[in-house]
Image (spheres, grey):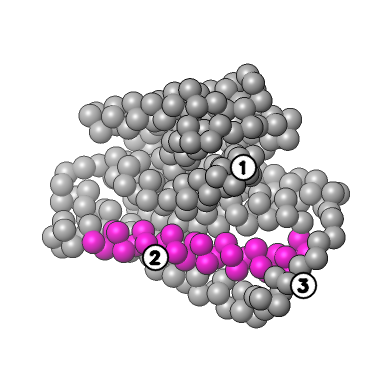
Amino acid sequence: MPVVLNLLLLILGFVLLIQSANVFVDASVGIARYLKVPTLVIGLTVVAMGTSAPELVISVSAALSGNSNLAIANAVGSNLFNLLFIVGFCAILYPISVKTAQISRDYWVSVAATVALLILIHTFIGSEIPRLGGFLFLAGFVIYMLVVIKSAMKNRADEDTAEDIKQKPLWKNIVLTIISIAVIMGAGQLTVMSAIDIAENIGVSERVIGLTIVSIGTSLPELVTAIIACRKKEGEFAIGFIIGSGIFNLMFVLGLAGAIMPLAVEHGALFDIAVLTIGTLAFFLYAKSGQRLIRLEGLLMVLMYAGYMGFVLLM
């Protein structure tokens, strides 16, 4: 198809992904509150997973269609955009207070997942990561979630959710969840096929498309949610779901994609994951230095992302 038509379909796919992801998050939170699941669990699971639903569908769809470079680039590119650009941009607008003691467990899980992926990519560069790697990531994610839920349940507080339940009945939230999942799946497939066609038509690699158009497009829900949270002085919530989203992208999204189909690794992926590792460590150093992210540190993070993107586009 013509490039212009593919661009229109790509934009349509992004719009459907973002809107359906928002519906999925709201409906899932409604179900969780009805069942009296703690708010902390909602933030670390439903919000993080819901905002990362587009990345999940696109990476899995890419793996199923044999485009594993797009699957890896989408997950890694989304994490880079979330961590460096979104957090940095929010810090520029609204300096963010960060209690490192509260996020240390989840942060170090994120570091461990990033380093593990770095080792896998370095080991199998130029070949394929076997399915065992994907299953190990999935197992690690399940263990992590069990720890999160167990920890949160210890501090479970009874909350009055009667008003939410009256406004959004359980059956309605269930129906909205099912419909939103179906739309996400269809929109994800549309986005992947359009991105691949664009790459083929203009001679750009799947990796570059995944790191730029696709990863940024699928991260728009995180961007909007983070800005709104920071504007309401809920910066720690934004930091929390950005970290949770990063863990979900690496351990579950790539884990599932890798378990479905061995992921081929091109040499550029090593550079991408190395930058993500450096950015992840830099974030914690900034946050720990003064228990907050100031505007200058946010600007440095955004500039780091801009420099990385410039390098990728000029390679």
Q: Position of residue 260 (x, y in %)?
A: 48, 55
Residue type, label 3? Ala
In this rendering, the label closer to the viewer, 2 or 3: 3
Q: Is residue 245 magenta?
A: no
Residue bearing mark 1: 233
- The count of marks equals 3
Left or right, residue 216 beside residue 249: left
Left or right, residue 158 beside residue 83: right
In percent of the image, x 28 and y 29: which residue is there?
A: 310
Q: Position of residue 121 (x, y in %)?
A: 45, 33
Name the mark on residue 16: 2
Magenta segment boundaries in residue numbering: 8-37
Name the mark on residue 253: none
Q: What is the distance, in whole Å, between disc 2 and disc 1 at their CAs?
A: 29 Å
Above or below for 110 versus 167: above
Tell me the quarter of the image containing the N terminus.
bottom left
Magenta stretch: dominant SS?
A: helix
Res 107 quadrant in image? top right
Sequence order check, earlier mark of 3 and 1: 3
Q: What is the distance, in whole Å, between disc 2 and disc 3 at their CAs?
A: 31 Å
The secondary element bearing badge 2 is classed as helix
